[in-house]
Image (cartoon, rainbow, N blue to C red):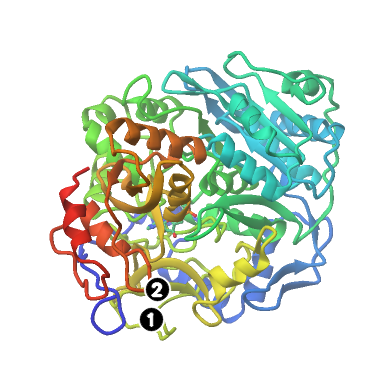
Amino acid sequence: MSSGNSIESVLHETRSFPPSAEFSAQANIKSQEEYQQMWQRAKDDPAGFWGDMAENLDWFKKYDSVLEGDMPETKWFSGGKLNASYQCLDRHLDSWRKNKAAIIWEGEPGDVRVLRYQDLYREVCKFANVLKSLGVETGDRVTLYMPMIPELAIAMLACARIGAPHSIIFGGFSSEAIADRNNDAQAKVVVTADGGWRRGKVVPLKANVDGSLDKSPSVQKVVVVRRTGCDVDMVPDRDYWWHDLAEKASPDCDPVELDSEHPLYILYTSGSTGKPKGVLHTTAGYMLGTTMTSKWVFDLKEDDTYWCTADIGWVTGHSYIVYGPLSNGATTLMYEGAPNWPDEGRFWEIVEKYQVNIFYTAPTAIRAFIKWGDDWPAKSDLSSLRLLGTVGEPISPDAWMWYHKTIGQERCPIVDTWWQTETGGIMLSPLPGVTATKPGSCTTPLPGVVPDIVTEEGESLGDNQGGLLVMKQPWPHMLRTLYGDHDRFLDVYFSKIDGCYFAGDGARRDEDGCYWIMGRVDDVINVAGHRLSTMEVESALGAHSAVAEAAVVGFPHEIKGEGICCFVTLKTADGTDELKKELIAHVRTQIGAIATPDQIRFAAAVPKTRSGKIMRRLLRDIAAGKESVGDTTTLEDYSVLASLRAEDG
Ligand code: WT7
């Protein structure tokens, strides 16, 4: 916090890119007037607005009321009955869409599968019956720890069909992390694969699950997809091959008629303290939010091929590979592997091969593309692209301009979408046929989103004053609780600013009403677009026998956005390179490859305030190699600083 009560903002970007008249004319939302009118209506009369939007869902029983209560305790569409898998599948089958490609999938080795809506429907029904045969009932939790293969989407929709909330764990997490999540969710069944392909190597998913099971007593059965053919241990009466069970299963399975507020899924995400948070989303509100935002922001059209490059293990994949696109009857492309396998041109070959029209990726990927050079995209024909998107972290104006010129060929609008695991769907984003975009800004709120920028005391700030980003009005796709810990839900999101949802991000709003995200204001770091808590890495390090204390901070990283820097004080051992390697390996076993430290710095002590709080700001400056370290008046021991700087990487 700088002068007064606001956060200093240094970015001044004045370029602006209005949509072309051609794009606007064909867009789902066509004009500033249309957007303004929707936004105002949703603000003044949320129940009326969202009630109208709810016509886009298929209801087994219509709801009695659109919205009950206010933040943080809201209920949407009370009395209504519906099913998310029905929204994504059944409702498309009585039209020509039954033969439309729902999922176009390409494996890393180059194998291809296309599932038409009726194929996907049949596979989902079969697997829903498999889950039932394994004892999964409505309300039971199922863990999915899978590669990016069609069976992952099938398993999600099968869970949704029988009302068993899924909890998807990204394949980069370790056995320890799987066990924690299995236990928190009390999962009954785990669905996994023998392995998944990543840069030509097998990620040993089943072996990782095996390593978690003696610590996850709630898990009774494991279903394994044969993907790579690698060797796995199969324990009789516990482990089953997917194909064995699915072969015998009936292709008919009625969707369960679920309450609007029935839990659809849990997704674990990092917070600034303590264990991962089980963000819980429910059926009607989440489906409505992802359905409408997909239509508005990605401007989905019947003949589009849409590709979101995220992993389904993150919320982006949940909302914008599976639920949003399929609910709209779109064709969603799924790719299993790495962008640089077998070479750095892979993504652009895929764009050309499938004539991708809409491409949604992350700034960390864009930075990698820039580094790999313009020759790679130049090898492929990118003329099918009509719209580009980005998500996960602030994108620098330079990277935005590169994306605009080199990939979008100055023809495609870019939607920079700000949202969170907790918000369920996109909140702030350009509408591609309406908004004049600005490099680095996620621009304006979608209809139904009422944000503000406030001080720590909750006072609204003026134009261009940095502060805390909050939401002042509830939206249908917001999280309902943190699984098993409602108090933490209230505390984390609703106790900081009275009556508002607090996002954890700093931001400013410019004179045109456009939002500029300035990053997290808590102890969460954003590594390659994924949230990690510095606390989690600290406790993982603290669990190693040689470590006395650890302090972890982010530092600017060319590709990943932020890298992980660990300051470690040792009990007695020497700070050798061997030990550095061991500590890195240790964090990978405790949390997983996604938390791999970039730097370990041994230190005699970490700087603390007189009250014993680690001075992360100082450590951040040191990790970033900055000389001036700002205000040190509350530092307990000045000599610590000099010795930390002397210890280099
Ligand atoms: C955090 C949420 C939402 C899917 C991916 C991440 C940052 C996200 C943007 C953006 C600037 C962004 C924020 C947010 N973030 N999108 N367009 N511009 N920052 O989901 O893991 O829940 O992380 O990602 O800091 O709080 P997540």
Amino acid at dot 2: Leu
**Residue occupied by mark 1:** 455
Quadrant hosting residue 546: top left
Q: Is mark 2 within 8 Å of ligand 1?
A: no
Point out residue 202 in the picture as x, y percentages from the top left corner: 50, 20
Q: Tell me: residue 231, above or below residue 151.
A: above
Q: CA distance from mark 1 to mark 2?
A: 6 Å
Task: Count up the numbered dots.
Answer: 2
Q: Residue at x 57, y 81 (%)?
A: 44
Mark 2 falls on what kind of element?
Answer: strand
In this rendering, is residue 116 above or below 611?
above
Q: Say which residue appears at 58% left-offset and 39% top-offset.
A: 176
Dot 1 falls on a residue whose secondary structure is loop
Residue 243 image offset from top left, x and y in percent:
74, 19
Residue 106: percent from the left, percent from the top?
51, 24
The tag earlier along the polypeptide, 1 or 2, is 1
Q: Residue furthest left?
A: 627
For the residues bearing labels 1 and 2, Cβ distance under 8 angstroms = yes
Q: Is residue 201 left or right of residue 423?
A: left
The reply, left or right, for residue 433 in relation to residue 559 is right
Crowding near the residue tagged with mark 2, few <14, some 14–19, many ≥20 C-alpha atoms within 10 Å: many
Tell which of 550 and 452 is nearer to you: 550
Q: Which quadrant would residue 191 be assigned to in this image?
A: top right
* Residue carrying label 2: 468
Relative side of 6 to 213, left or right:
left
Asked whether mark 1 lies closer than 8 Å to ligand 1, one says: no
> Which kind of residue does numbered mark 1 sit on?
Thr
As drawn, 574 above or below 225: below
